[in-house]
Image (cartoon, rainbow, N blue to C red):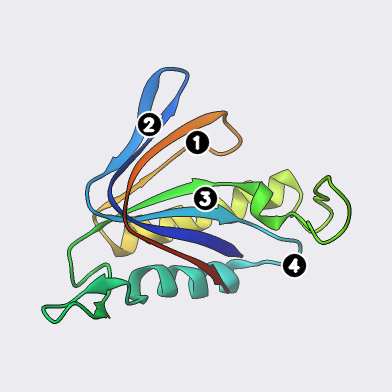
Amino acid sequence: MKALIQRVRRASVTVEGRRVGAIDHGLLALVGVEKGDDEAAAERLLHKLLHYRVFSDAAGKMNLDLQQVDGGLLLVSQFTLAADTRKGLRPSFSSAAPPADGERLFHYLLDRAEATWPKVASGEFAANMQVELINDGPVTFLLES
């Protein structure tokens, strides 16, 4: 599994004109599921999402994690993260998990996140979503499990 994370001041997801998820300061995670991913990969990714130190401490160093700053976590499914862009001018999605597997593992990750941390929101799997964010930094990392 992959997650492109962005440290945000706030972020939200809208589907067909209705806001389906929003957080204040925290992490926006665009999540991609690849062939061969399983629940163990989702658990590893969740651990990284909750413990990756990308928030500044009193000295201005990135030493604090999401839980230490009491931040929100906005999970948004994005299968295009699994694209192979090494050749040509059109992405190949051959490494992406089939939709049913992607949906199952994304919801597994979401369920585990909600059971672990109280400030979790999400988009809708496979929906046409509009994501708004105020990037903080900007600070952006690609996490892989």
The C terminus sits in image quarter: bottom right
Mark 1, residue position = 124
Residue 105, position as x, y percentages in the image: 59, 56
Q: Which residue is drawn at the image coordinates 24% and 56% (left, top)?
A: 118
Precedes in sequence: disc 1 or disc 4: 4
Q: Is residue 84 left or right of residue 138?
A: right
Instruction: Calculate the distance from the C-alpha at mark 3 to the C-alpha at mark 2.
Output: 15 Å
Crowdedness near tag 1: few (<14), some (14–19) or many (≥20) residues, C-alpha within 10 Å: some
Label annotation for residue 36 = 4
Precedes in sequence: disc 3 or disc 2: 2
Closer to the camera: disc 3 or disc 1?
Answer: 1
Instruction: Calculate the distance from the C-alpha at mark 2 to the C-alpha at mark 1.
Output: 8 Å
Q: Which residue is drawn at the image coordinates 30% and 39% (left, top)?
A: 22
Crowdedness near tag 3: few (<14), some (14–19) or many (≥20) residues, C-alpha within 10 Å: some
Residue 86, position as x, y percentages in the image: 82, 61
Precedes in sequence: disc 3 or disc 1: 3
Check disc 2 and report its element: helix, strand or loop: strand
For the residue pair 72 and 113, the one nearer the viewer reads as 72
Q: Amino acid at mark 2?
A: Val
Residue 84, position as x, y percentages in the image: 79, 58
Q: Is residue 112 left or right of residue 32?
A: left
Mark 2, residue position = 20
Q: Which residue is drawn at the image coordinates 24% and 77% (left, top)?
A: 64
The reply to whether discs 2 and 1 touch (Cβ–Cβ < 8 Å) is yes
The reply to whether discs 2 and 4 touch (Cβ–Cβ < 8 Å) is no
For the view shown, which residue lies furthest in the top direction? Answer: 17
Mark 3, residue position = 107
